[in-house]
Amino acid sequence: MGVLRLAQSLARVGRGLPILAAMSASRERLLSAFRKEFGRQPALVAEAPGRINLIGEHTDYNDGLVLPVAIDRTVAVAAAPGDGRYLRVLALDYNERDEFTLDDIACIRNGGWRSYVRGVFWALQDAGCEIPGADLAITGDVPQGAGLSSSAALEVAVAGALTALSGREVARRDLALLCRRAENDFAGVQSGIMDQFAAALSQPAQALFIDCRSLEVEYVPLPLEQEAVDIVAVDSGVARRLGDTPYNERRRECAEAAKFLAVASVTDANWEMLAAARPSLPERLFRRARHVISENKRVREAADSLRRADLTTLGALLRASHESLRDDFEVSTPELDLLVELAWSTEGVIGARLTGAGFGGCTVNLVHRAALSRFDRDVLLPYREQTGLSAASYACRPAAGLTVGHV
């Protein structure tokens, strides 16, 4: 691809996308690694954020409601057109590589990051996008295995880079849907659309209120800066990969509950239907359905509380969400429970709950900025002492979604 054609491609694909700011030290490291690995300069860098879900857990794949926020931790992909239909990929943070051709995109069992990258190539090509051969170098600072959606950030960044190289105009919504297909049908993780939408569509200082059935998105202002409140993610130190947890089992249980309730999805049920079905509904399925119905209600109320800048109500909703995830959906762990209980008892913490799929990973905490040092002292230190795990906290700021820019 010539320089002029590449510039035209980027102008089309980048329309409406924020152009990357001056290269940070990590991006300079990425560019240097690309040049060393492939012997030339990359043509572009695509970057997509991780996300933290304020509320709305295990509702996305039930056609329900979610309220995620993109965070200022990202995956960045440096890319240049490659040789014919040949692909070369460097994962800088692992010092690992992958090579394959567009004519043989095989799934690697337990392939880790390779499965997501290959899955994006596969999904784009299967959708009819003429993807060229390419050289890619990847780095990121989204904590992995922590429930902050590093996989979706990787998928969206790779997809953004590839479509820019190809000159294809793909709407970011459609790009997110293709990335979800890569994760569902290639990598084998049956996630919903929330993570990919957050990585592709987010805007600064706003949460995404997503209806996962209609795919309608509403931007809800976050009154955090004016209230001097930070979103703090705490990595419990209990890593999980969704394919290794009962995540897919929870999906099956929700589908079973929907059949008992004679609805397309548990989201279509209401309290009256659930009460009427209780005598014949297995207790396990009853509790799964109760969580989904109540969580959807909490998401609506949380969005309303943000519009009113009512963070006290939002904090109470976060607590109720965690209790439901712990007791009805059974996706918490003793470590996550300890983290949120310590946070609930700490002055300056507005709300806390597990975030992400559970089974380990992170908690999300709304913390007054003036109380951040107290939070570390009263939450992280006793947690480490009681569990022996090296929990880490990340103060996060809301961020924009996918960006693509020239190098």
Image (cartoon, rainbow, N blue to C red):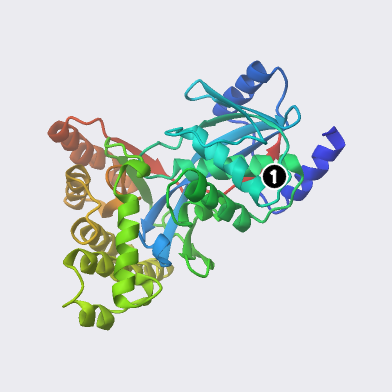
**Residue placed at 50% from the left, 37% from the top?**
115
Mark 1: which amino acid?
Answer: Thr
Within the image, what quadrant is residue 22 found in?
top right
Could one spot residue 366 in this view of the protein? no
Q: Where 57 falls versus 143 (above or below)?
A: below
Please give the residue where the numbered disc 1 appears in the rendered image: 163
**Residue placed at 82% from the left, 44% from the top?**
8
SS assignment at label 1:
helix
In the displayed structure image, the side of residue 262 where residue 133 appears, left or right? right
Give the mark count: 1
- Mark 1 neighbour density, 10 Å: few (under 14) some (14–19) many (20 or more): many
- Give x and y (percent) for residue 353: 27, 53
Q: Where 1 falls versus 211 (above or below)?
A: above
Q: Where 258 falls versus 179 (above or below)?
A: below
Within the image, what quadrant is residue 138 found in?
top right
Closest to the observer, 364 or 101: 101
Indicate the quadrant containing the N terminus: top left, top right, bottom left or bottom right.
Answer: top right
Indicate the quadrant containing the C terminus: top left, top right, bottom left or bottom right.
Answer: top right
Within the image, what quadrant is residue 102 found in?
top right
